[in-house]
RNA sequence: UCCUGAGUAGCUCAAUGGCAGAGCAUUCGGCUGUUAACCGAAGGGUUGUAGGUUCGAGUCCUACCUCAGGAGCCA
């Protein structure tokens, strides 16, 4: 707004930019007279005392206005304020033990920028409201302290997620949102008319960032994705944001290490920046601290090799605390060799490739020592569910070979206080582009990361098929139109390499980190099956 | 698509088949430490829609609409 820099501005102008304090930083102004710009959140009175509570987007502060302490017109002006009227408040910051934040504002003057008319009061009161009403007024609901806190945390989660990749050598390459065909054959797509041809809103940028990963080595994308699934649950939106890394020469083990380091960075960042916001929303931060707490010893830190009884299991299990993986996976100084070939079993039917030669240093990146999220193979998770069903802890038995249902995921994640990684699902229930496990080709080299506390899958990832012939036959087996995937097959015609990546749904991550019971509160304007207004 | 539940004042909810109610919000009045303040008063209704049963329907029946929770599917 150009006006703000006008030399003719004076302090009485509502948008003057000088000497404006924010509520979140009032502690630094104790004893000083400051000016706030914001809105009236609520007002109480007791005789000749007024207690207006102001908010400015950074927090709330209670003001106090004794009738005897201010000019009569100021008292009357404050008394006339209606909820969400916009104001410019001048007052002195005073520490007060009675205030929830520790500070109060002795109001000296209030200018009204806009008075909400009494005939049309602000609809959202500091009382209880129903879901439908709140969602219908989402454009106003976001003003409440709880919603504002959630949106601030969301912003930090998004920033931390990008920060992790940006500072670890990843290049952001955003894929198109308009696409000519399905990325995966399963989900329902939003179709639209593209100058006479059918087109779709993207449901994942993965196939495209596989292309940019083979160009740039390590890439990620971050943007909205769309799924026209008719899902009405606390975990589903039709439009949601996903951040997806894709790395050339990285195998599933590297993918899992990346996911763990990535989530650890995000949780660490929100914990160091949002203590006050977590308090506002009533989040038990101990649950988050447990996620990033180091693990000293746990029998549940299984890896695939343990599950299958290979010789390397003892090396992993007996690793010293702080040693985050078996020595064959991590090089000296905890630098991960992304393609952990030495741990990979000999390919069953793969083309003759020298594992050592295909491990370029350019694609390696440093993954810091982490806290080792528990890992389960699909088979181990299934066994856990069999025991749970026998003990009556889950209602329905899990059928081997089926995907895990929501109650199954909830039970599994409830057994751990960190995100749990389930890897090597049956290939038959997973996407066509996932690389088969060389040891057991009926399994896919994929991983789902389940958030703690029953929040379900927040990350899905895999190593991608790198063989042209295998990928082509997979596309045909899934009855996908070969012509639409010619460009994707090109990636296997010209210098194909093993590569892996994952996608994290931002809203589910926010719901978990904030402890919310529905993803609709994690995004400014949620798009759900039955709602596209406002 | 399927299962379950809910639609009554601006909001959150009551009301044996028998006079349409309360709290909050709004307006007016009271209170010098309130924290969703409290106390007193006033205004505020086509009970989601359309039919049906009945002397009489917010309440029972049928259809539809809307919303919510869940399943499937997924992040």
Image (spheres, coloured by chain):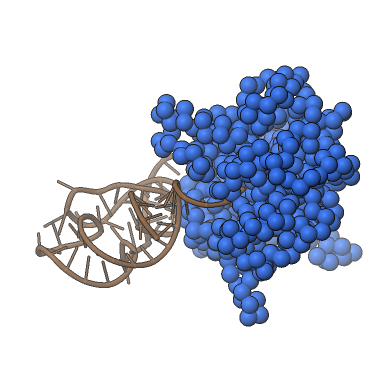
Chain colours: A blue, B brown
Whole-percent x and y of residue A218? Answer: 82, 49
Q: Tell me the quadrant of the picture where the C terminus of chain A can be found.
A: bottom right
Residue at the location (76% across, 62% down)? A490
- Judging depth in this view, the residue of B30 and A489 nearest the camera is A489
Asked if A394 appears above or below A484 in the picture, the reply is: above
Residue A455 horizontal side relative to residue A352, left or right: left
Give residue A313's quadrant in the image.
Answer: top right
Give residue A59's quadrant in the image.
Answer: top right
**Quick check: can you spot residue A17?**
no
Asked if A158 appears above or below A334 in the picture, the reply is: below
Residue at the location (63% across, 56% down)? A474
Asked if A394 appears above or below A14 in the picture, the reply is: above
Residue A135 horizontal side relative to residue B21, left or right: right
Whole-percent x and y of residue A345? Answer: 72, 35
Q: Tell me the quadrant of the picture where the N terminus of chain A can be found.
A: bottom right
Whole-percent x and y of residue A22? Answer: 76, 46
Asked if A224 appears above or below A308 in the picture, the reply is: below
Residue at the location (66% across, 49% down)? A434
- Judging depth in this view, the residue of A414 and A320 nearest the camera is A320
Whole-percent x and y of residue A314? Answer: 71, 20
Residue at the location (49% across, 55% down)? A231
Q: How many marks?
A: 0
**Quick check: can you spot residue A43?**
yes
């Amino acid at each position: 707004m150009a006006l703000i820099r006008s030399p003719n501005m004076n302090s009485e102008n509502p948008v003057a930019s000088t000497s404006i304090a924010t509520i979140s930083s009032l502690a630094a102004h104790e004893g000083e007279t400051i000016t706030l710009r914001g809105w009236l959140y609520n007002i109480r009175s007791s005789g000749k005392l007024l207690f207006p509570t102001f908010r400015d987007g950074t927090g709330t502060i209670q003001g106090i206005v004794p009738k005897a302490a201010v000019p009569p017109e100021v008292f009357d002006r404050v008394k006339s304020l209606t909820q969400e009227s916009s104001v410019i408040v001048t007052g002195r910051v005073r520490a007060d033990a009675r205030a929830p934040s520790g500070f109060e504002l002795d109001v000296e003057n209030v200018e009204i920028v806009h008075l909400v008319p009494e005939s049309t009061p602000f609809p959202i009161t500091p009382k209880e409201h129903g879901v439908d009403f709140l969602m219908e007024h989402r454009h106003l609901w976001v003003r409440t302290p709880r919603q504002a806190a959630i949106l601030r945390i969301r912003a930090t989660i998004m920033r931390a997620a990008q920060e992790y990749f940006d500072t670890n050598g990843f290049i952001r390459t955003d894929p198109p949102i308009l696409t000519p065909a399905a990325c995966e054959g399963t989900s329902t797509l939003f179709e639209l008319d593209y100058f006479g041809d059918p087109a779709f809103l993207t449901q994942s940028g993965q196939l495209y960032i596989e292309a940019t990963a083979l160009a740039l080595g390590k890439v990620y994308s971050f943007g909205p994705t769309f799924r026209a699934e008719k899902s009405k649950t606390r975990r589903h939106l039709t439009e949601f944001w996903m951040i997806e890394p894709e790395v050339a020469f990285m195998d599933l083990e590297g993918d899992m290490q990346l996911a763990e380091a990535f989530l650890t960075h995000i949780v660490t960042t929100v914990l160091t920046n949002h203590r006050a916001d977590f308090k506002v929303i009533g989040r038990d931060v101990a649950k988050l601290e447990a996620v990033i707490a180091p693990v000293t010893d746990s029998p549940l830190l299984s890896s695939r090799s343990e599950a299958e009884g290979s010789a390397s299991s003892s090396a992993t299990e007996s690793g010293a605390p702080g040693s985050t993986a078996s020595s064959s996976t991590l090089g000296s100084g905890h630098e991960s060799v992304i393609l952990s070939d030495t741990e990979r079993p000999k390919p069953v039917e793969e083309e003759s490739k020298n594992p050592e030669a295909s491990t370029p240093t350019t694609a390696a990146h440093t993954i810091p020592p982490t806290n080792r999220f528990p890992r389960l193979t699909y088979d181990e998770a299934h066994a856990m569910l069999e025991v749970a069903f026998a003990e009556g802890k889950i209602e329905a038995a899990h059928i081997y070979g089926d995907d895990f249902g929501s109650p199954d995921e909830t039970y599994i994640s409830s057994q751990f206080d960190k995100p749990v990684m389930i890897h090597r699902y049956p290939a038959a229930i997973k996407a066509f582009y996932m690389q088969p496990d060389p040891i057991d080709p009926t399994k896919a080299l994929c991983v789902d990361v389940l958030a703690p506390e029953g929040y379900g899958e927040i990350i899905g990832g895999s190593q991608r098929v790198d063989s042209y012939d295998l990928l082509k036959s997979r596309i045909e087996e899934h009855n996908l139109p070969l012509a639409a995937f010619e460009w994707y097959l090109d990636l296997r015609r010209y210098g194909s390499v093993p590569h892996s990546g994952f996608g994290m749904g931002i809203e589910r991550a926010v719901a978990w980190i904030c402890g919310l019971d529905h993803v609709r509160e994690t995004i400014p304007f949620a798009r759900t099956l039955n709602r596209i207004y406002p």
